[in-house]
Image: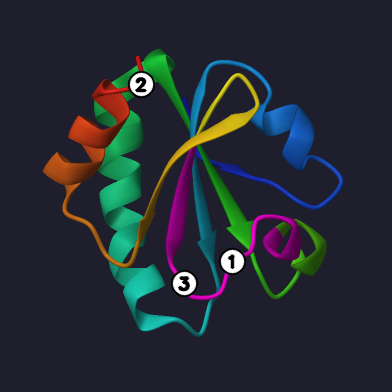
């Protein structure tokens, strides 16, 4: 499954089913750029079990505000449309895979 870029308009649709890892990021954020390849690895490793969604906070301020995103990268784990977990800052792949395994 490919990583999906969500907008304020598509966010609810993208996160309403199954386990979804949402990356709130911005192009100017160094740690956001560092975690991008890690998210691609997680996406490949987890396959169809987990969906990875990215939200650019500069372009989608309504969604970022709704979830109280104060620092980036912030990663939220959704399960069937509800936030079930959160981590802030760069995370190694193993930590993200373990986090997601907890919600499968």
User: Is residue 75 placed above or below 104 in the rendered structure?
Assistant: below
Residue at 65%, 69% in the rendered image: 57
Residue at 61%, 29% in the rendered image: 82
Residue 72, label in figure: 3
- Residue positioned most to the left: 94
**Residue 46, quarter of the rendered image:** top left
Q: Does the residue at mark 3 contact the one at mark 1 (Cβ under 8 Å)? A: yes
Q: CA distance from mark 3 to mark 1?
A: 7 Å
Q: CA distance from mark 2 to mark 1?
A: 22 Å
Q: Does the residue at mark 2 contact the one at mark 1 (Cβ under 8 Å)? A: no
Residue at 12%, 41% in the rendered image: 94
Q: Position of residue 3 (x, y in %)?
A: 50, 39
Q: Is residue 66 magenta?
A: yes
Residue hosting label 2: 103
- Camera-side residue: 28 or 72? 72
Residue 29, label in figure: none
**Residue 43, quarter of the rendered image:** top left
Residue hosting label 1: 69
Answer few, some or many: residues within 10 Å of disc 2's Cα (few below 14, many 20 plus, some between 14 and 19): some
Q: Position of residue 69 (x, y in %)?
A: 59, 66
Q: Nearer the viewer, mark 3 or mark 1?
A: 1
For the image shown, how many numbered marks are present on the structure? 3
Q: Position of residue 12 (x, y in %)?
A: 76, 35
Residue at 70%, 75% in the rendered image: 58
| Horizontal side, residue 98 vs residue 32: left or right | left
Q: Does the residue at mark 2 contact the one at mark 3 (Cβ under 8 Å)? A: no
Q: Nearer the viewer, mark 2 or mark 3?
A: 2
Colour scheme used in the picture?
Answer: rainbow
Q: Position of residue 25 (x, y in %)?
A: 52, 67
Which residues are the magenta region? 64-77
Mark 2 and mark 3 lie on one chain; the one further toward the N terminus is 3
Circle 3 — which element?
loop
């Amino acid at each position: 499954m490919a990583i999906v870029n969500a907008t304020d308009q598509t966010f609810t649709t993208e996160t309403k089913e199954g386990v979804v890892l949402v990356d709130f990021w911005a192009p100017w954020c160094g740690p956001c750029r560092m975690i991008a390849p890690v998210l691609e690895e997680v996406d490949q490793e987890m396959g169809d079990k987990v969906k990875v969604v990215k939200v650019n906070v500069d372009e989608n301020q309504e969604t970022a505000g709704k979830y109280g995103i104060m620092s980036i990268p912030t990663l939220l784990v959704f399960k069937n449309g509800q936030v079930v977990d959160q981590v802030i800052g760069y995370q190694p792949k193993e930590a993200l895979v373990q986090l997601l395994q907890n919600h499968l």
